[in-house]
Image (spheres, rainbow, N blue to C red):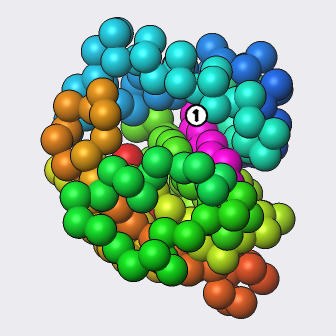
Amino acid sequence: MCEDDSGAPVSVVMERMDGSAAVRAEDAFRRIYAEAFAEAPYHETEDDIAAAFRRFRALAQRPAFRAVLARSEYGEPIGMAYGFPLGSDTVWWDELTEPVPDDMRREDGHRTFGLIELAVRGAWRGEGVARRLHRTLLDGVVAERVLLNVHPEGKAAAAAYRAWGYRKIGEARVPGEEAGVYDVMLLDLGARFRTSVGSMMPQPAR
């Protein structure tokens, strides 16, 4: 747990949000995103951030969009996560560089939850914030699995996702992204995750 200037521990509050609430809190999400993804290997610019939040506002219009914002007890935004269930018309599987079996790519609006972003500001890493964000975001999700893309040079993030139970299933070229090819990772939401998602998951370094 982090400490304030006096050395006293500071607690963390998780706020669950639907799309409309997330849009109202966009400034907080943007602050976290801008700090986390200015770092290597992302090096996102102001233009990148602006584009990301145009997408954020569009994604937040989806009926099943959900988000979690982590704040300190003083209201300071320190971490965020958001995503939504993938519909039958998703292009996610089309972006893979190598095709996967039809049964794997089949979507019906409920089967797969797409984890779009999860990030924690640098000063708050190593405190279990990302683990709690991940667990809170997925709590109550009715899905078989979770899908995400991770930057190929984000070694610490990828290692943490693997420790959480994710496995790499391929690589994808994402239109408009400059990283070239992203690693695509999948988490099977078996019974042990449905009952206590992330109860033993370590903190990602992203």
How many numbered discs?
1
Which residue carries the number 1 mark? Answer: 78
Task: Say whether residue 23 is left or right of residue 97.
Answer: right
From what the image shows, is residue 180 above or below residue 26?
below
Which of the 4 quarters of the picture holds residue 126?
Answer: bottom left
The magenta-colored residue range is: 78-85
x, y percentage for residue 77? Answer: 63, 28
What secondary structure is the stretch in magenta mostly built from?
strand
Q: Secondary structure at mark 1?
A: strand
Rendered residue at 39%/32% (across/down): 36
Toward the viewer: 156 or 146? 146
Type of amino acid under label 1: Ile
The correct choice, above or below, for 27 with respect to 67 in the image is above
Q: Residue at x 63, y 56 (%)?
A: 88
Residue 8, image quadrant:
top right
From the top left corner, tell me how far across and down residue 96 is, in percent. 30, 58
Q: Is residue 149 rendered to the left or right of residue 116?
A: left
